[in-house]
Image: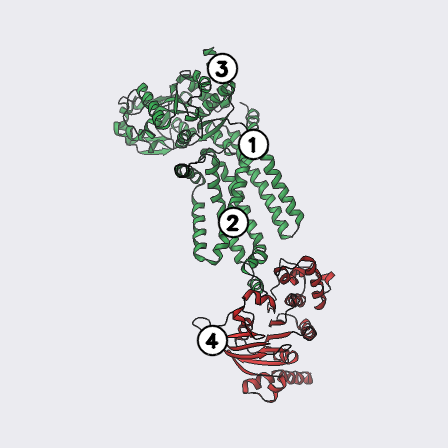
Chain colours: A green, B red
């Protein structure tokens, strides 16, 4: 894919991504203002409340944005479970609400701090005069303190708005579409045009909103209504233009497809979307969801379809540590999913994306390593690289126990850099994914697992309880079962991953779809 | 009529700022409360409109105990002119002058016409000054707005806390003379706090002299001159003449 093609692909998604980004950011800042200003006012007479509020807001500010957003998902899920049990209604814990809650909290510190500082900086002579001529506390606040503090309060709102627009790009993993979708998808598929596009769009939006608030600020300072009207009109235009494309989609109730944040998942997500589209089902995607978020979301019906891997659910959700055969794992898992969550397994796609350990072929040969068993003696002299998850996963504990592995160094990498790290010799061994195209690209050797410490990881198509008995939907997806072998998936992944002549996940998905439809015709 | 009965104020742990003040100010009278810095005169003044509440004793206005009034309502009935002027910087001259009427909930037209009257009364032509901001006018003009603001709700009583202290001498003398005329024509009762004995003698009907929280002597300027209660009163009353003599001697040498 040429840079121009990538740019056109990015531009096609702009109305949806930008629309959600604006709706999310503006709502969060408005909510932040309506919470922070009253708290700041209440705290003027109570040093205790002031200390508590400012302290809490500062602590929240030190939590990395990604973690804060991720924390709100389980929190809201638990709360929704509680309200459903207690009052008979729940709410969507995925997407908008957790993102909104986290961003609102994020916006509060500068507004809170500036409102307090602004009111405290009002000239004592003006305050004494206000009391002396007979203003009540409320009139003092409304007629004197707030108007005089307003420029400082607005400066705080500007800071908050810039932070929120930037941080909102991190709401993609909790299922909220935003300009962050470009960045997450681009990082995973090494599509730098997408990454840049997302960054620049977010920066431009932050700049526009900042300038509009600055205009309002000048209007306040000069007491010029025309500036205020211009600023308000500008905000209305930005918000309105962003929301309109979203409204067009509100009427339909689409099937929601979830994907985790790596290339293979984007391809499979696009493939599912194309098949559903062809069968007349409107579908949308929630891309780049966190690994546990996506399963909870399917359980609660917030997403309808996604592909997970048998070993992941086996270890994470079923807490199983034994490793029976491939077919047994699938059967037991599907029974367990149906009986505990009413999730329906449509079936395995035909390939495994297993946790596997890989080395450069020449390095493995030189050291005489063919399987994990050969590593136990040499591990203390070797360096291992892994993705962000592996070293805290049960699979890693099982492998270490089975083969007595203890490496000299453990390093964590983002997936793209992981394969490069082993290819360049920065580390000797990596935790790889067996269907990853880069295993072919870098000619890596996958190490055998003679003791069977790792479970199988068949890709399995799952449907939520809402659509478990939707025959037309299942018929549209059924042809995918058993239709993709490991080699096909590796080649498909490589087309997206490779650094030259890249294709978009959608493009690769349509090639796969054409092949599958050909098989079944 | 304002009566201070055994009025006292002490801040926690400190010696009394004001102790056992008994003073009656007749309706229509112009009284100057004079004394050195820290003698408690501003505190005494602030207790009349309950900007501060007494620790002991009470203030009666026209026979009724102010402790029974709502403090905010009381302050709206009494004009107050501040030492540091205290205009609201984000409001125009007209808005500042009319602010008391605004908080009393009067309608816009009546506030507008009253503000024009007030500005004319303090000799600031409304058409020139209405829409200016405090930052754009001189100190003397600002305090004229301060006086207009104090008079807006037609109070019977005006309290002034060192109102002319921060203004340049020429503007100060003109404003002081103008205010005395306004006092007479409107039939106000004025209590003026100052440490400037010349100003007190020139403006006031009676002078109440304070030292260390206590009232030392009350009377017309002439009474305080002719029969001072002690050396402090004599020294205070003699200040203007002593300065005039020194000034004349300096001029003669030149």
Q: Is residue A335 left or right of residue B196?
A: left
In the displayed structure, would residue A211 be above or below residue A308? below
Badges 3 and 2: C-beta atoms under 8 Å apart? Answer: no
Badge 3: chain ID:
A
Q: SS for tag 4? A: loop
Same chain, marks 2 and 4? no
Determine which residue is flagged by label 1: A246
Q: Chain of mark 2?
A: A
Residue ID for mark 4: B16
Q: Residue A152's spot in the image, x, y percent?
A: 56, 52
Q: CA distance from mark 1 to mark 3?
A: 30 Å
First in sequence: mark 1 vs mark 2 = 2
Q: Which mark is residue A514?
A: 3
In the depicted structure, whether residue B9 falls above or below residue A325: below
Q: Are marks 4 and 3 on the same chain?
A: no
- Give me the C-alpha separation between circle 4 and circle 1: 70 Å
Which x, y percent locates residue A32?
A: 51, 45
What residue did someone put label 2 on? A111
Q: CA distance from mark 4 to mark 3?
A: 96 Å
Q: Residue at x 43, y 17 (%)?
A: A478
Pair 1/3: label in front: 1
Taking the view exactly as shown, the residue that stands out farthest to the bottom is B227
Place residue A78 in its image quadrant.
top left
Q: Which chain is indicated by disc 1?
A: A
Q: CA distance from mark 1 to mark 2?
A: 29 Å
Q: Quadrant of residue B244?
A: bottom right
* Label whose residue precedes the other's in the sequence (3 or 2): 2
Point out residue A292 in the picture as x, y percentages from the top left corner. 39, 32
Front position among marks 2 and 4: 4
Whole-angstrom CA distance, mark 3 to mark 2, is 54 Å
Q: Are marks 4 and 1 on the same chain?
A: no
């Amino acid at each position: 894919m040429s840079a121009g093609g990538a740019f056109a692909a990015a531009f096609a998604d702009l109305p949806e991504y930008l629309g959600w980004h604006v709706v999310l950011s503006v709502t969060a800042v408005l909510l932040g203002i309506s919470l922070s200003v009253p708290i700041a006012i209440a705290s003027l007479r109570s040093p205790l409340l002031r200390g508590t509020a400012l302290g809490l807001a500062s602590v929240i500010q030190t939590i990395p944005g990604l973690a804060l957003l991720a924390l709100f998902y389980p929190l809201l899920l638990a709360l929704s479970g509680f309200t459903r049990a207690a009052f008979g209604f729940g709410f969507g814990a995925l997407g908008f609400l957790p993102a909104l809650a986290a961003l609102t909290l994020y916006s509060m510190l500068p507004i809170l701090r500036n409102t307090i500082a602004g009111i405290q900086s009002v000239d004592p002579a003006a305050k004494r005069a206000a009391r002396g001529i007979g203003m009540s506390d409320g009139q003092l606040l409304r007629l004197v303190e707030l108007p005089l503090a307003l420029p400082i309060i607005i400066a705080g709102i500007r800071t908050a708005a810039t932070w929120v627009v930037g941080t909102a790009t991190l709401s993609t993993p909790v299922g909220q579409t935003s300009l962050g979708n470009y960045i997450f998808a681009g990082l995973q598929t090494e599509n730098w045009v997408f990454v840049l596009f997302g960054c620049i769009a977010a920066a431009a939006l932050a700049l526009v909103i900042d300038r509009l608030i600055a205009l309002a600020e000048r209007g306040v300072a000069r007491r010029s209504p025309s500036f205020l009207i211009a600023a308000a009109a500008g905000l209305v235009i930005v918000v309105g233009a962003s929301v309109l494309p979203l409204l067009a989609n509100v009427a339909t109730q689409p099937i929601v497809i979830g994907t985790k944040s790596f290339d293979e998942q984007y391809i499979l997500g696009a493939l599912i979307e194309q098949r559903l589209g062809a069968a007349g089902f409107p579908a949308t995607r929630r891309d780049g969801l966190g690994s546990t978020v996506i399963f909870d979301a399917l359980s609660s019906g917030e997403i309808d379809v996604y592909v997970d891997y048998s070993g992941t659910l086996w270890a994470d959700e079923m807490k199983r540590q034994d490793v029976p055969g491939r077919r047994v794992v699938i059967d037991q898992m599907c029974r367990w999913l149906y009986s505990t969550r009413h999730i329906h397994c449509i079936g395995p796609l035909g390939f495994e994306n297993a946790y596997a350990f890989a080395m450069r072929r020449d390095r493995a040969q030189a050291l005489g390593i063919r399987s994990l068993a050969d590593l136990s003696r040499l591990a203390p002299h070797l360096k291992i690289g892994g993705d962000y998850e592996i070293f805290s996963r049960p699979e890693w504990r099982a492998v270490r126990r089975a083969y007595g592995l203890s490496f000299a160094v453990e390093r964590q990498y983002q997936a793209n850099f992981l394969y490069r790290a082993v290819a360049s010799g920065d580390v000797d061994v990596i935790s790889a994914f067996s269907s990853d195209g880069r295993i072919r690209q870098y000619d890596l050797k996958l190490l055998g697992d003679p003791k069977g410490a790792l479970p199988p990881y068949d890709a399995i198509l799952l449907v939520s309880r809402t659509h478990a008995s939707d025959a037309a939907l299942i018929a549209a997806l059924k042809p995918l079962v058993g239709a993709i072998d490991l080699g096909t998936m590796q080649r498909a992944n490589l087309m997206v991953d490779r650094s030259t002549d890249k294709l978009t996940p959608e493009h690769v998905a349509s090639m796969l779809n054409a092949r599958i439809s050909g098989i079944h015709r | 009529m304002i009566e201070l009965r055994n009025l006292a104020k002490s801040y926690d742990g400190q010696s009394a700022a004001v102790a056992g003040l008994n003073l009656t100010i007749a309706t229509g009278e112009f009284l100057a409360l004079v004394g050195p810095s820290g003698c408690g005169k501003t505190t005494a003044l602030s207790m009349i409109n309950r900007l501060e509440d007494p620790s002991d004793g009470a203030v009666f206005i026209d026979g009724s105990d102010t402790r029974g009034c709502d403090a905010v309502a009381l302050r709206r009935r009494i004009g107050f002119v501040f030492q540091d002027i205290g205009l609201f910087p984000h409001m125009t001259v007209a808005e500042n002058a009319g602010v008391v009427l605004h908080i009393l909930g009067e309608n816009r037209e009546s506030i507008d016409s009253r503000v024009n009257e007030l500005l004319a009364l303090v000799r600031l032509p409304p058409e020139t000054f209405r829409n200016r901001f405090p930052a754009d006018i001189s100190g003397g003009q600002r305090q004229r707005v301060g006086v207009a603001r104090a008079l807006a709700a037609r109070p019977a009583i005006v309290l002034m806390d060192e109102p002319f202290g921060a203004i340049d001498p020429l503007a100060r003398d003109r404003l002081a003379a103008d205010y005395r005329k306004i006092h007479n024509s409107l039939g106000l009762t004025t209590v003026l706090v100052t440490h400037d004995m010349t100003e007190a003698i020139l403006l006031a009907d009676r002078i109440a002299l304070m030292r260390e929280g206590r009232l030392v002597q009350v009377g017309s300027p002439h009474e305080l001159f002719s029969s001072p209660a002690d050396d402090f009163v004599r020294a205070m009353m003699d200040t203007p003449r002593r300065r005039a003599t020194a000034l004349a001697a300096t001029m003669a040498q030149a």
